[in-house]
Amino acid sequence: MTTTPTRVYVARLVGLPVFDPRGEQVGKVRDVVVTVRSDAHQPRALGLVVEVFGRRRIFVPMTRVTNIDSGQVYTTGVINLRRFEQRPTETLVMGEMLDRQVVIRDSAVRGSIYDVALEQGRNRDWLVSRLAVQEPGRGLRRRGQTHVVEWNAVIGLASPDEAQGATQLIAALNDMRPADAASTLHDLPTDRRTAVVAELDDERLAEVLEEMPDEDQVEILSHLDPERAADILEEMSADDAADLIADLPPEQASRLLELMEPEEAEDVKRLMVYDEETAGGMMTPEPVILPPDATIAEALAHVRREELPTSLAAQVYVCRPPLETPTGKLLGLAHIQRLLREPPSELVAGVLDQETTYIHPEATLQDVAAHVAYYNLTAAPVVDDQGRLLGVVTVDDLLDHMLPDGWRENAARAEA
């Protein structure tokens, strides 16, 4: 194992796996806690915020970090799995220090912090040594000039600007998976989270909201302008949007449905007719639907779409027109494994699964779970009495409804 590098940039540290002395992964780095006393005192890194199982965040002191090597962090000794609670004297680098406005002393250049370097001193303490600062863009330049300066070469490090932006933090969030970004957003201070939400792209915010707890979804959506809130709901999958709208006060829910595009609102309203714990309440109305004359090549082109979730890409459904749910009669489904084994020019209708039965929208949660397990499905088709495809219940949606409320936190406590 090589020696820990003398300088580490926090933006590159975030997301790295953390291992205990036995080589077992404990979690991932989510932030670094520093103490910033004044512009005259060098900030000291106190420890890492590490996300463990269940998206719970714990504090790992820097004294426990023995090595940072090849994209991994190693720790020593017993780690306290108690949930991290930030103290008033502590600052989160990713959550609070990025985008902080500072002035470079000698040049009087004003800019925002976009990265922070840590170095380990002779006494083994980790200290903030350098700051990466970016000037505002000018004219047609989208990005301003960047500077990497010593920590004491700036003014304003210890005094946050009320007009602090969110550009650098949003860039970091956009590089994360939606679930990781949701966890980061959840733990931000209220004012900081509000600033980030205001600047996040609608599509990205929708992806992140889908991964957040119900109470966070309601809180964030309630603080948005109604028109933007409606736009966000349109970007969400119909089943997630329906669940979120059902948690809102009736007047607000009705208002948002009115503001949504009629076609998007109609999909949501259809799902809200059913009880949340039934197949109809859990289903998504947008699986891959093809006509009987579609070829296998066309089917594979549809499931290759990058934005398509894995659970929906595993099967295609052949229906008579119309091909929007509720469709014409469902003729059958084809599994991607079968499609990959057949000539691309063959018709999908010729390789349909003839054994899998379908479920009714009023089927209970237990009925759906038994059906998915019996047929080894990643998604179960839901049909009405006329045999029309209404939607599909995916495995991930099924698990979301089967696991008890607060299961993530309970799992984390059990591990501790």
Image (cartoon, grey):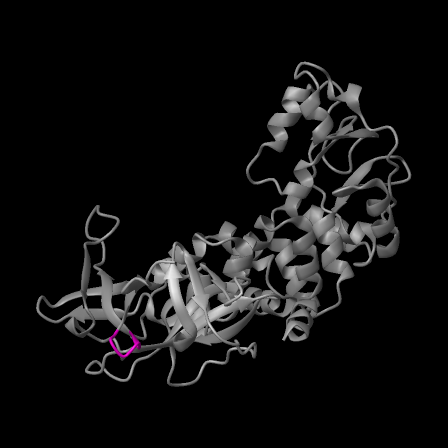
Q: Number of marks in the image?
A: 0
Of residues 197 and 310, the one nearer the viewer is 310
Instruction: Give, as a single range, the part of the protein colored magenta.
Output: 121-126
Is 122 colored magenta in this rendering?
Answer: yes
Which residue appears at 29% of the width and 66% of the height? 116
Residue at 75% over, 67% down: 404
Q: Is residue 25 left or right of residue 379?
A: left
Q: Position of residue 35 (x, y in %)?
A: 33, 80
In the rendered image, residue 147 lying in the magenta stretch gets the answer no
- The N terminus, quarter of image: bottom left
Residue 169 seen from this side: yes
Res. 317 image quadrant: top right
Q: Main secondary structure of the magenta part?
A: loop
Quadrant where the C terminus is found in the figure: bottom right
User: Is 388 on the left-hand or right-hand side of 245?
Assistant: right
Nearer-the-camera pick, 103 or 362? 103
- Residue found farthest to the left: 106
Residue 360 location, quadrant? top right
In percent of width and height, residue 36 lies at 30, 80
Instruction: Tell me if I can see residue 224 in this picture.
Output: no
